[in-house]
Image (cartoon, rainbow, N blue to C red):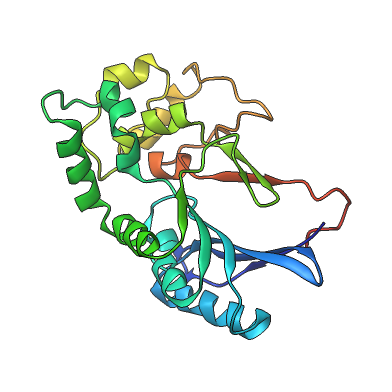
Amino acid sequence: MNCEIEFLPVGSASKPGDAIVVRYGETDAYELMTIDGGNLDSGKLVVEHVRNNFGENAGIKHAVLTHSDADHASGLREILDGLPVENLWLHMPWGVVSEARKYLADTKSSDDELTRKIVREYDIIAEIVTKASKKTTKIYMPFAGHTIGPFQVLSPYKSFYTALMPQFDRTPDPDQAAIAAAQMWIGKQPSFIKVVADKVAAKVQKWIEETWAKERLKDGGVTNPSNESSVILYGDFGIPGACS
């Protein structure tokens, strides 16, 4: 199988994002996949790029959102408006509320109340899901073990995402002790001082072992929980040089 990956420009300077178009298959029998949509302008650029290069009637087999940050998600609205999308893969933070209750400090609100709070905060993701739901687009939550076209999802595991979600900057307050006991505490949008402290603590923190089959994104650096929840894809195309 052949593969072509195109990275479209998104943002500038210290505010870059991602908008990626993937074509895979054979010359006369290929499918298209998008990974993230960048901002609104780059989302329009993706639509224009697909139509100009693959035809006015071209459609997207799989649209993947790696994580919910606006510079990755905003343009996906334009892709859904401008192109037919068969399958949408994204994490809905409210979709794991029941599993994440043990990691939330709020023990009084119902699942429905917590869900409504999170949906309000993640209005872009909610809008994307609403747009897709009004079409024939199928919606999936991408967790490790799933297959998306020629790619395997390596991360995140659902259990990992469930522990990360309460640590996002727009979700209800986490129960830090419960998450730390599960060895998955990262923290909500750490300050500079906390980042320095975390770098020291990371040397002694007993993280779940990372292996080739279990990607944890831990390479000694410190990042925020939303980035840590990103979808990691692995593609095996059989022969060297098949993907360019």
Q: Is residue 2 above or below residue 12?
A: above
Q: Quadrant of residue 102?
A: top left
Image coords of residue 6 (percent x, y): 66, 68
Question: In the picture provided, is 178 more to the left or to the right than 23?
Answer: left
x and y percentages locating residue 191 in the rendered image:
30, 41
Q: Nearer the viewer, residue 184 or 66?
A: 66
Residue 232: quarter of image: top right
Instruction: Give the side of residue 76 with respect to residue 112, left or right.
Output: right
Q: Residue at x 34, y 39 (%)?
A: 95
Q: Quarter of the image containing the N terminus?
A: bottom right
Residue 13, above or below 52: above
Q: Nearer the viewer, residue 126 or 36?
A: 126
Q: Is residue 76 left or right of residue 220?
A: left
Q: Is residue 190 visible?
A: no
Q: In the orientation shown, which residue stands out farthest toward the front?
A: 136
Front residue of this view, candidates 67 and 145: 145
Among all residues in the image, which is located at the extreme right? 239
Residue 15 visible here:
yes
Quadrant occupied by the C terminus: bottom right
- Residue 161 rendering spot, x and y as whole percentages: 42, 34
> Which residue does the image show at 89% across and 51% down from the upper left?
239
* Residue farthest toward the left in the current orientation of the protein: 108
Tell me residue 147's x, y (percent): 63, 43
